Image (cartoon, rainbow, N blue to C red):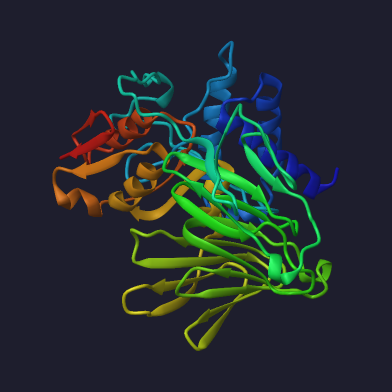
Amino acid sequence: MDTNYNKQDFQKLVEKYLDGRISLPEMKLLINYTESYQQDNAWEELDPDNGYRNRMLENILAGIKKDEPKKPKVINLLKSNIFKYAVAAAVLLFVFFNAFYDEHGIPASKIPEKVVVNSTIKIGSDKATLTTESGETIVLEKGKSYTAKNIVSNGEELVYTKTDVAKKTIAYNYLTVPRGGEFFVKLADGTQVWLNSESKLKYPVSFVEGETRKVELVYGEAYFTVSPSTAHKGAKFQVLTGLQDIEVIGTQFNVKAYRDEDVIYTTLVEGKVAVAIADQKEMLKPNQQLTLNKLNKKRTVSEVDVYSETAWKKGLFAFKSKNLKEIMQVLSRWYDVDVEFEDKSLENIEFKGVLNKKQNIEEILTLIKKTKFINAYEIKKDRIIIKK
């Protein structure tokens, strides 16, 4: 059987397992796939003693012994002794799972899974506000449809169709995603944009054929899959962020430029981009990230884990050596809450892990509490207080 095909199937099964949607036959198939990769040098490079894979197998086998497969918590905090999560690369899968024991040596299968939800903090969802060229504002959210001249929305995405337009008649729309939201828009040239929480994008309703296609990330975070210039008479694509211009030929990249952060992050997934800052340009290669300090204008290019940087687009938040302040900053946008640290020293505790965006905030806070680095947390309406 084709190995690449097997690995694609493996990735789908891992995603189902993490979402809690995997069936009993699929769980058994996941084990078979895992065993079939025993000779894969990817395992040896990542985990010489095969410890992670073996623990993963033990966990899946434990689930199979039950009448119903257990829905796993899609979360991993390496600072605790519970080590769990699978990370799938695009072609070659590197899979990690927990040791499945808590800090007292109790098997994870015996740890109570249910978290009592007492707060009114809601999980983020697809929602945004569209501002048209006439100044009209339209609320976009699940269950609400919207149709205009060359625009259609089902409440979960916004799609523009191509129309001919003269340069002097270019009209701009704004798509604003609030805290607690995310949204997808397909521009008139076919470019796809995923907007993260607390983000705003300015873009033409239609593009002038053959001329540079310009959009502006006013603030926030966006992932772009750009329609290639070859499909638009060689017209390049530019993303403006105020301090930098990103010139694109046809590629996938992520831009993070939040108003309350001092750094702009540009991460290239595939293709090529040139980031212009003042009178200088920096060329990025795939898996490279350019960081621009908004205060002193200092810039740095480095290799990064693209999966961690773009996992939000796939319904996950992946944290790699992030401190608790940074993690809570991300969570505060998604759950639309404010976070307060009772002791400032807690802000600098580093964690590694993956969070499922569909989890209740209480589940996440309870898991962080299990690490023993914090003793308690308190929720007051839309405010979370982290206590030592």
Coordinates of residue 328 in the picture (x, y in percent): 32, 45
Task: Check the image and name the residue furthest to the bottom.
Answer: 279
| Residue closest to the eye, 360 or 12 | 360
Task: Check the image and name the residue furthest to the top.
Answer: 67
| Residue 80 visible here | yes
Query: What residue is at 48 percent from the left and 40 percent from the top?
Result: 181
Coordinates of residue 70 in the picture (x, y in percent): 53, 20
Coordinates of residue 281 in the picture (x, y in percent): 55, 84
Query: What residue is at 62 percent from the left and 53 percent from the top?
Result: 193
Coordinates of residue 279 in the picture (x, y in percent): 50, 89
| Residue closest to the eye, 182 or 187 | 187
Query: What residue is at 16 percent from the left and 51 percent from the top?
Result: 344
| Figure quadrant of residue 143 | top right
Query: What residue is at 49 percent from the left and 54 percent from the top?
Result: 200
| Residue 86 visible here | no
Q: Is residue 26 above or below residue 219?
A: above
Quarter in which the C terminus is drawn: top left
| Figure quadrant of residue 252 | bottom right
Q: Is residue 34 left or right of residue 243?
A: right
Q: Is residue 31 above or below residue 226?
A: above
